[in-house]
């Protein structure tokens, strides 16, 4: 990409980067939570049986 000189362009680029990072973090967090929750659920159901 060519280097941009306008402030607005830089701002939008920064926002896009930030949004991409946020989405990545959210996905990682969700996968971690899912990984945590799944074994817990299995253990509980096993105990009941």
Image (cartoon, grey):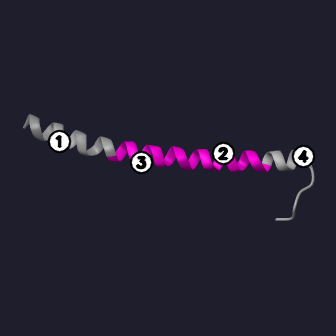
Residue 27 locus on image (x, y percent): 50, 47
Q: Are marks 1 and 3 in contact (CB under 8 Å)?
A: no
Secondary structure under badge 4? Answer: helix
In three-dimensional space, the C-alpha distance between marks 2 and 4, rounded to whole angstroms, equals 18 Å
Report the residue marked by disc 4. 7
Q: Residue at x 54, y 47 (%)?
A: 25
Report the residue marked by disc 1. 43
**Between tags 3 and 4, which lies in front?**
4
Q: Residue at x 36, y 44 (%)?
A: 34
In three-dimensional space, the C-alpha distance between marks 2 and 3, rounded to whole angstroms, equals 18 Å
Report the residue marked by disc 2. 19
Q: 27 left or right of 33?
A: right
Earlier sequence position, callout 2 versus callout 3: 2
**Between tags 2 and 4, which lies in front?**
4
Q: Are marks 1 and 4 in contact (CB under 8 Å)?
A: no
Report the residue marked by disc 3. 31
Residue that protrudes farthest toward the left in the picture:
49
Query: Is residue 8 one of those drawn in magenta?
Result: no
Q: Residue at x 17, y 41 (%)?
A: 43
Earlier sequence position, callout 1 versus callout 2: 2
* Residue bounds of the magenta highlight: 13-35
Secondary structure under badge 3? Answer: helix
Q: Are marks 1 and 2 in contact (CB under 8 Å)?
A: no
Residue 33 locus on image (x, y percent): 38, 42
How packed mark 4 is, by other alpha carbons closer than 10 Å (few <14, some 14-19, many 20 or more), is few
In three-dimensional space, the C-alpha distance between marks 1 and 2, rounded to whole angstroms, equals 37 Å
Secondary structure under badge 1? Answer: helix
How packed mark 2 is, by other alpha carbons closer than 10 Å (few <14, some 14-19, many 20 or more), is few
17 vs 3: above or below:
above
Q: Which mark is residue 28?
A: none
């Amino acid at each position: 990409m060519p280097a941009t000189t306008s402030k607005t362009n830089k701002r939008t680029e920064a926002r896009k980067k930030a949004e991409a990072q946020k989405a990545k973090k959210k996905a990682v967090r969700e996968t971690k939570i899912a990984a945590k929750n799944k074994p817990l659920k299995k253990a509980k159901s096993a105990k009941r049986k």
